[in-house]
Image: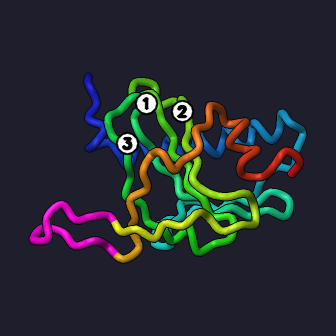
Amino acid sequence: MERNTSEDSPHIEMAILHEFIAKLIQCMWERNKALPEIVSSEIDNQGHDVVISCGNITRHIQLKASKHQGSRTDLDIDVGFCKESSGCLVRVFYDPIKLEMQEFLFFGSEAGSLPPSTDAHPGAKSPLIKKPRKNVRNISRGRYKRVKSIDEVAILLFGKNP
């Protein structure tokens, strides 16, 4: 049976969120670092999907799942996470057959700093169809940092010695 990733997107996003959290905990365990405290929201109305604290660093993280080698390059994102110190976005590219994480893009700053500016609004495709939404911005792929492993993501999130 061939899956329709558009129709299955809520299941995909939840699977990727759980894999992300599990792999992050495993990474911290293997590095013999402090284990993170994790709080996820039922409703994403503040621009973040999960809040993860490790040591004295707290990250408000928006997680976006994209098919590995998919055609979509830019994303419209809710920039509510940008109001939080250490807020960030992690875009996870996954294998659409196995639902396994492949690589990552990171949009944010080092822990304790506000994320980079997201001032520009996305253009509406047609003024008659859709107006730009207040808290949604288009972040081009070139503004993200490419990250190959969950270990590198953990270092970006919490530093080498959390």
Which residue lies at the image location 56% right of the left edge and 39% below the top edge? 104
- Residues packed near mark 3 inside 10 Å, few (<14), some (14 to 19) or many (20 plus): few
Give the quarter of the figure containing the N terminus. top left
Residue 130: x and y in percent read: 18, 69
Task: Give the label, 2 or 3, closer to the camera.
Answer: 3
Q: Which residues are magenta?
A: 122-133
Tell me if 56 is positioned left or right of 72 in this view: right
Q: Which residue is mark 1?
A: 68
Q: Is residue 103 left or right of residue 140?
A: right
- Mark 1, secondary structure of its residue: loop
Residue 73, label in figure? 3
| Spot occupied by residue 148 in the image (x, y as percentages of width and height) | 62, 31
What type is the residue that disc 3 sits on?
Answer: Thr
The first of marks 2 and 3 along the sequence is 3
Q: Earlier in the sequence, mark 1 or mark 3?
A: 1
Alpha-carbon distance for marks 2 and 3? 17 Å
**Visible in this render: residue 43?**
no
Q: Which residue is mark 2?
A: 101
Q: Name which quarter of the figure residue 133 lies in.
A: bottom left
* Mark closer to the chain start, 1 or 2: 1
